[in-house]
Amino acid sequence: MTAAAEDSHYQAGPPSQRLARIGEIVAARLAATHGVQTIPVDGIAMFVYPDFLPAGECARLIAMIDAGSQPSALFSEGADNSYRTSHSCNLDRWDDEVEAIDNKVCLLLGIDPRHGETLQGQRYRVGQEFKPHHDFFHVDQPYWAEMEASGGQRSWTAMIYLNMPEAGGATDFPMAGISVNPRPGLLLAWNNMGPDGAPNLRTLHAGSPVAAGTKYIVTKWFRERPWI
């Protein structure tokens, strides 16, 4: 599941030395990795890695998503069903191919695999979207106690585009004024925290509606502590 959109009056969360340090270490690692490009966006540590996955691996993940996807869920209780209209599924993390890709993402970011949630696949058909939301958890929401106990706050997000729809489907960051278009195999990563380790409201983002074709992605979220 993913956190639904939160109004500005919600409490995002306090600064954290632990999360600030995670953000600093991962950003430095990505900036120094050959093939990774820093996106010059104000207020967010954001990177892209073109051709992170080859076409064959993308195709196999797409087949897994088609086989297991169900209507996507939200954490927020009573959320509007029109808010996230995609289909998604948690991939089998013990499948050899999935595990290899999962480990590849963890190695790229330099984060212990124990801190990573299960790789989630998502499919967007024509007209489907995910309206503006944050990936981090808001600490005043009913779900927070369970999330805090199962690994705490989300730090980084790593998203891999598996294909390119015929039209639409960009990932928009409206507060940052940037939009990333799907490209097969492209990995997009960003820190959900600010430099002080507090949730970064500028990471608000949306999966814009697909206008033609189908969009497939996989997303991996990382926690501040081992995910259980």
Image: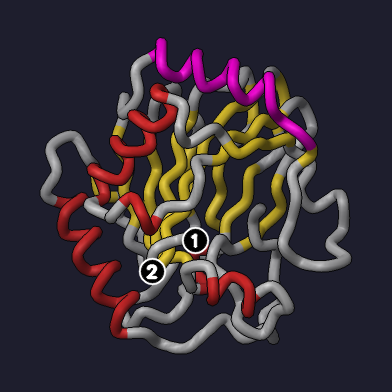
Q: Which mark is residue 123?
A: none
Position of residue 69 relative to residue 33, above or below, is above
**Helix, strand, or loop for circle 2?**
loop
Q: Residue 154: percent from the left, percent from the top?
A: 47, 65
| Quadrant of the image occupied by residue 33 | top left
Q: Residue at 18%, 34% (x, y): give it.
A: 35
| Quadrant of the image occupied by residue 49 | top left
Q: Residue 76: percent from the left, percent from the top?
A: 76, 66
Q: Amino acid at mark 2?
A: Arg
Q: Residue 225: percent from the left, percent from the top?
A: 38, 69
Position of residue 173 relative to residue 137, above or below, is above
Tell me the magenta residue range: 55-70
User: Does the segment drawn in magenta span residue 156?
Assistant: no
**Helix, strand, or loop for circle 1?**
loop
Q: Front-most of 220 and 116?
A: 116
Q: Which mark is residue 228?
A: 1
**Residue assigned mark 2:** 225
